Image (tube, rainbow, N blue to C red):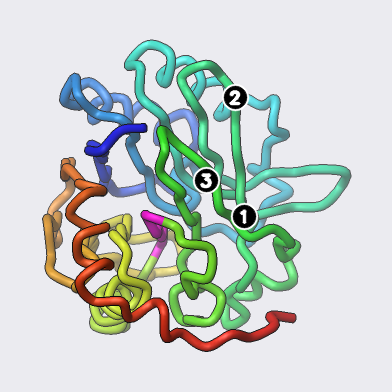
Amino acid sequence: MKTELNVALIQTDLLWEQPQSNRKQIETYFEQLASSTDVVFLPEMFSTGFTMRPERVAEPMSGITIQWMKRWSEKLQVAVAGSIAIEEEGKFYNRFVWVNVDGSTHHYDKRHRYTPAGEHVAYQAGATDGIIDFKGWKVCLRICYDLRFPVWSRNTSAYDLLVFVANWPAPRIHAWDTLLQARAIENMSFTLGVNRIGSDANDNIYPGHSAAYDPLGACLGTAENKQGLTQVTLNKNDQEAIRTQLNFLNDRDSFLLQ
């Protein structure tokens, strides 16, 4: 188990439905990672932007982008994680894929699809809890619109890190900032949010605001509205000390999620 987890958040513009160009652009940030990095996070649909045309860009789990993630994970000796459009058995998923150094993968399919954009028509809803184990840390994976649904992210499984990757637009960026901080506070967990910047083919503007929060909601690092790399060290002992002193999670409500 690692007491300290070194995480990196890549906040970048995304070229519309151009996977090869986006991968190449992201590689410039990979080359800037600190040697101590354990995992690097990329935005939602980092290879294409938030497209509702998965039939044009979706890949299988054996596809080019997953293989690219595996090559860089092995080369850098860090886990690589982010969301891409995946096709599986004729259905499409907005899938948060986590690639380990040894080539093994985990994934979480977005549960709450963004209905105003028609995501519920283009993509299937996920059916798993999105919780994985990594170097002794229990990590909860979530995607964008999931942030608005606190019950779905409620810390009933004693996770240590909650991660949201997103394409969250400028008109609602105050909600992004507020809800990320709230998720950290209510779940007494380190919480990361990785957003994109720039604009897309639907004239949406994305202002970034990728950030990391501690279990009491204090900001540990933010990219603000600039393209770039944010690197933060999370200390599990610090989190456990806070949870021991302030046992708020012991008083959480029980419920059944349907």
Picture layout, residue 29 above or below residue 112: above
Q: Nearer the viewer, residue 166 or 39?
A: 39
Q: Residue at x 69, y 80 (%)?
A: 257
Q: Residue at x 36, y 42 (%)?
A: 41
- Of badges 2 and 1, nearer the viewer stands 2
* Quadrant housing residue 89: top right
Give the residue type at disc 3: Glu
The percent coordinates of residue 124 (x first, y second) are 75, 62
Quadrant assignment for the N terminus = top left
The percent coordinates of residue 141 (x first, y second) are 50, 55
- Where does the magenta region start and end? 160-167
Give the residue type at disc 2: Ser
The percent coordinates of residue 144 (x first, y second) are 46, 66
* Quadrant housing residue 42: top left
Instruction: Name which of mark 2 and mark 1 comes first in the sequence.
Output: 1
- Residue denoted by label 3: 17
- Of badges 1 and 3, nearer the viewer stands 1
Labelled disc at residue 104: 2
Labelled disc at residue 94: 1
Picture layout, residue 234 above or below residue 153: above
